[in-house]
Image (spheres, coloured by chain):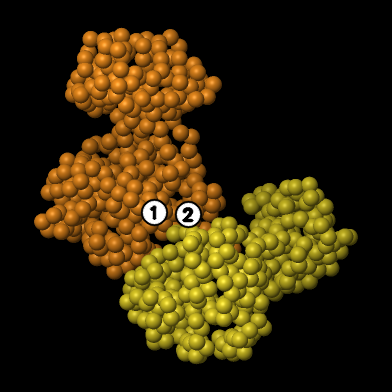
Chain colours: A orange, B yellow
Amino acid sequence: MIGFDHISKIVQRTDSKIVLFVMDGLGGLPHPETGRTELETARTPNLDKVAAESICGLIDPVSPGITPGSGPGHLSLFGYAPLKYEIGRGVLEALGIGVELKEEDVAARGNFCTVDTEGRISDRRAGRISTEKNQELCRLLSGIKVAGVELVVAPVKEHRFVLLLRGKKLSGDLIDSDPQHVGLAPLPVKAVSSSAETTARLVNEFVVQAKETLRSCHPANMVLLRGFSQLPHWPLMSDVFKLNPAAIASYPMYRGLARLVGMKVLATGGTLAEEMATLRQHYSEHDFFFLHVKQTDSRGEDGDFQAKVKAIEEIDAYLPELLSLKPDVLMVTGDHSTPATLASHSWHPVPFMLRSHWCRPDHVREFNESACAQGAMGRFPSVEIMTLALANALKLDKFGA
Amino acid sequence: MIGFDHISKIVQRTDSKIVLFVMDGLGGLPHPETGRTELETARTPNLDKVAAESICGLIDPVSPGITPGSGPGHLSLFGYAPLKYEIGRGVLEALGIGVELKEEDVAARGNFCTVDTEGRISDRRAGRISTEKNQELCRLLSGIKVAGVELVVAPVKEHRFVLLLRGKKLSGDLIDSDPQHVGLAPLPVKAVSSSAETTARLVNEFVVQAKETLRSCHPANMVLLRGFSQLPHWPLMSDVFKLNPAAIASYPMYRGLARLVGMKVLATGGTLAEEMATLRQHYSEHDFFFLHVKQTDSRGEDGDFQAKVKAIEEIDAYLPELLSLKPDVLMVTGDHSTPATLASHSWHPVPFMLRSHWCRPDHVREFNESACAQGAMGRFPSVEIMTLALANALKLDKFGA
């Protein structure tokens, strides 16, 4: 695959516009009774019409057989090699709940856990306490003061929370306190490099106070911390691709991921109708739009096949509005598959189509897994779609004379 | 992809013969009225017959979305990873006009440009002077003498020329004199490494005299130099693939590229009939032939759809003669696409077919973009075709016991 160093030398800023429409968790698996996937079951006249004018294929977000999380799934769509551009777990968790991270912040993923009278872990998830209980405990922990650093304790779901340290000269170069096994005591947090020793001390002070604060809160009477990390310093899309990119997404995770690669995150509502209105409103201001809908993934995670079919059909109805903006390049795909029969993310490649005046359409007439498998793009890594989009937008010069 | 180190360990010299038939700029885009590409429009009974006996696919010269120049386009067909084996612009320009380069020669690409009375560039291309004017100015510049080095100034097209320095201990480690922007003065050529300091001084002496010589030649009253480079030292096909390769091509660029990888360049005429006669005449002397036709690319660059169709049909008529030589492996493909509708090289993958006794033919019955998209080879990098050819010629041992 061609790297950022090469791309940045041959890319030109032009007026042409690219829209990347991501239906989260788009790919599926056949329903056991019909043998048809969610996409193959849904009535999608508009997506099918676009497919007939597109070049189609199946994309692998990370590598064949690898089930991606939301981070790698999206980064590869943005052109960032997901095995190279890894995000720390703490940072990803913070992005997921919309905690805004500053330059030197250190974020960790926290678990409430249960320890016995001798301080040994008996349940790493504290019996998966309710999210409400979690919120209550996070409020308690927010009272903790450690000199020299500002602390944020923010609830996620069930037993999970985010710990944020804000201050000067902090470092995420720390080893987890979570020993990953019951029967062991939580570990003191250790610095991997000498520059992280102060941060390690601050975190350990927090843990001591947290233990004290939670003493009577059985089963959630202790915390485990892991994935200490800071915002990565990555090349921005504006530098690498000479784009002025914008993101339209209502969930914090995708807004955060877009910000990491330098997209402007536009204010928008939670429905696709509102997202479309945002796209229309800002269409003249940017040359790249990442438009994200979550419903396909959520219904897949629910294991609700028919609800995912319905979500796809509802999204299909918005295609004419999207097309009316006449993007020079339109890509429709997903960040990974979320088959309702698995009720989770999966490794299956994702249907992909790209429509442009120069795309050399293939014979695919429907937008779904089996049709796209016959597409002229074949099966290829998701990370290559950005180069393809730039080419189709006529933004790339020749490589080599 | 498997590298030269691995290939060279398992390849064996045998009597089997491989022919790589390159139709330059072969791939196309649909005609807006018919929806069919140049290849899909042309009547090609002979190519189609070969397709029916071949394994087919679509190849990406550099990477999906990347439009290759002639250099990377051909190097990948020869098995040389185009992002690794990069050719300097000066060398490539010299190859393109058939200037024969020696070991220590330094070549640069030159532009005639216009400078104002204060020496600042007002037109980087001197109003794209005619090629005749260019030839006249190159004759003038050829009169320049610089002690310690032999100089060659050779015209290319319009405002472009090649400057060649021939002498001892020269180095191409130099920074361009072309500032790439109007309003700035040409830069003195600077050495990047200390070994290039003498060469920098020699080039700057040439530039001073060139400015003086061209003083009254407005608009072409100055020169800009860039892409200083020397012949690369690459592994040769005879070493890596244990082949005794020959090239049959009438254009200097392709003859030069073939020489870079160690092919013997056979004398031939400018028509395909003459090239075929050359192939027949030397068929017993080599085990690999690179046969190149330019017309498909030229008509594509002209933007003349029908003329490209006609060129394809004319080439098709020569297939029976080629087949009568009974090559053990015949590959037919292009170095890149040159769609007439774009009138330039493009990023679109190129139809590919390989016919041999051992190729495991697929169901493709026509040689064109959409048929090859259904081929059993799928879509794959051009750089892999050489390994495939060697395998089909039964020249490769097992990898691993």
The residue depicted at 55 percent of the width and 66 percent of the height is: B10
Q: Percent x, y for residue A341?
A: 17, 48
Height in image: B129 above or below B291?
Answer: above
CB atoms of marks 2 and 1 within 8 Å: yes
Query: What residue is pinned by disc 2?
Result: A1
Looking at this view, is B253 or B278 the one in front?
B278
Residue at 55% over, 61% down: B6
Asked if residue B259 lies left or right of residue A10, the reply is right
Point 58% across, 65% down: residue: B8
- The chain identifier of the residue carrying mark 2 reads A
Instruction: Find numbered disc 2 in the image and state the secondary structure of the residue it sits on.
Output: loop
Which residue is located at x 34 percent, y 80 percent?
Answer: B365
Disc number for residue A381: 1
Residue A13 in view of the camera: yes
Who is closer to the viewer here, B205 or B282?
B282
Figure check: A178 above or below B2 = above
Q: CA distance from mark 2 to mark 1?
A: 9 Å
